[in-house]
Image (cartoon, helix red, strand yellow):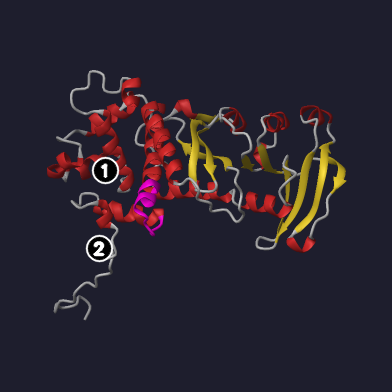
């Protein structure tokens, strides 16, 4: 692969290549292993199947551990971005939103994973706490990541936002933590649209009020400017401020946006879909192995996170290519118990393979009869 050559991943490697390292780590993700030892033991227990799995001859835990510690994690970042690009092409035209919108719609957020500071001093978050952050831009139409940035806990989400390339005419939906007028104004000048929830205590001067249907949940729809001197200096143009009451959660939301064309209810609906990024974080934390790390160096941690993200994207690609009706979770569970099956993958998900087969009753004595 080009990404392996780019970072000399297989330089002076005799047998255990980057591809074999990836297969071992992906096996650990797909089968819910708890550690490198667990992964190695389970693979070696199926030593006769390793050749057909592409891993080849047996290896030791230390071999896998050294590969994670020493081979550049950017190999797997590049592979992940290549697969994300492939998934985007496959899902092109899909729209899971409630409104018909030709623009791209992305959610931006950050999740924090706590780590032991004494074991990983490079991951300092606070004086006595360590953490790793996963900053993500998610396509809200398809639930496919657009961009992922892995940093130490000390990197603020606004700093990560500066690393993200933004597209003109696309919507970026963000929570309160992204209220930063210089950055919002740069997005505005770049012809991007932002939708961000307003923090308490921020004040604005009303310039104009727009008609709104209060039965739809829209309490107010206004053109405003910040009243604070520095806020007004950093964002000198008008913004749109929408107050919306959500009956389902009995919550009043206040949004800021630089888009004056969509209906207020559509702005509220787009913000509602921001929760998909929360669901994405929840999914990868619950069903993949990124909450407990199998190595202590920053390289090993980033390698593990990126291979977990690759696993998510590969499952999404398989679902789309095979036209599977099962959810990503169901696909993962089926693969996890069938990983060494010698059959075409589309047969694995056929209705005949997935039929519920009742366990036959044998005429045996019951223990508690």
- Residue 46 position within the rendered picture, expressed as x and y whole percent measured from the top left: 16, 45
Picture quadrant of residue 84: top left
- Label 2: which secondary element: loop
Q: Is residue 124 magenta?
A: no
- Residue 134 position within the rendered picture, expressed as x and y whole percent measured from the top left: 50, 36
Picture quadrant of residue 19: top left
Q: In this view, does 16 lie to the left or right of 230?
A: left
Q: Which of 138 and 227 is in front in this view?
A: 138
Q: Which comes before the other along the chain, label 1 or label 2?
A: 1
Q: Is residue 322 magenta?
A: yes
Residue at which label 1 appears: 38
Residue visible at 69% across and 49% down in the picture: 267
Residue visible at 43% across and 29% down in the picture: 120
Q: How far apart are marks 1 and 2 (CA)?
A: 28 Å
Picture quadrant of residue 216: bottom right
Residue at which label 2 appears: 353
Q: Which residue lies furthest to the bottom in this view?
A: 369
- Residue 301 position within the rendered picture, expressed as x and y whole percent measured from the top left: 40, 32
- Label 1: which secondary element: helix
Q: Residues within 10 Å of mark 2 (few under 14, many from 20)?
A: few
Is residue 127 something one can see in this rendering?
Answer: no
Residue visible at 36% across and 27% down in the picture: 75
From what the image shows, is residue 205 above or below residue 211?
above
Report the quarter where the N terminus lies. top left
Q: Nearer the viewer, residue 77 or 317?
A: 317
């Amino acid at each position: 692969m080009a990404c392996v050559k780019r970072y000399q991943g297989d330089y002076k490697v005799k047998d255990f290549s980057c591809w074999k390292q990836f297969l071992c780590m992906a096996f650990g993700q797909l089968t819910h292993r708890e550690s490198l030892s667990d992964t190695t033991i389970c693979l070696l227990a199926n030593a006769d199947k390793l050749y057909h799995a592409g891993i080849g001859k047996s290896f030791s835990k230390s071999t896998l551990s050294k590969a994670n510690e020493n081979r550049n994690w950017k190999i797997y970042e590049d592979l992940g971005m290549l697969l994300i690009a492939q998934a985007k092409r496959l899902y092109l035209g899909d729209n899971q939103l409630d409104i018909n919108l030709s623009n791209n719609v992305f959610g931006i957020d950050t999740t924090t994973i706590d780590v032991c500071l004494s074991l990983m001093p490079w991951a300092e978050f606070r004086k006595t706490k360590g953490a790793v952050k996963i900053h993500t831009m998610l396509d809200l139409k398809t639930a496919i990541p657009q961009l992922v940035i892995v940093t130490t806990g000390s990197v603020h989400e606004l700093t990560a936002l500066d690393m993200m390339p933004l597209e003109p005419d696309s919507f970026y939906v963000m929570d309160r933590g992204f209220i930063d007028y210089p950055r919002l104004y740069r997005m505005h000048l770049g012809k991007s649209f932002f939708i961000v929830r307003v923090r308490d205590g921020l004040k604005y001067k009303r310039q104009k009020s727009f008609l709104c249907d209060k039965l739809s949940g829209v309490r107010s729809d206004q053109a405003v400017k910040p009243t604070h001197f520095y806020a007004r200096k950093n964002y000198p143009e008008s913004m749109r401020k929408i107050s919306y009451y959500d009956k389902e959660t009995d919550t009043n939301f206040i949004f800021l946006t630089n888009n004056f064309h969509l209906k207020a209810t559509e702005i509220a609906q787009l913000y509602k879909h921001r929760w998909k990024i929360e669901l994405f974080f929840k999914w990868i934390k619950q069903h993949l192995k990124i909450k407990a790390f199998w190595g202590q160096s920053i390289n090993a941690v980033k390698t593990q996170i990126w291979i977990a993200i690759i696993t998510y994207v590969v499952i999404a690609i398989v679902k789309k290519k095979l036209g599977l009706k099962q959810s990503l979770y169901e696909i993962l569970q089926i693969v996890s118990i069938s990983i060494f099956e010698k059959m075409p993958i589309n047969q694995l998900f056929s209705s005949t393979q997935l039929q519920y087969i009742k366990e036959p009753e044998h005429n045996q004595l019951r223990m508690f009869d």
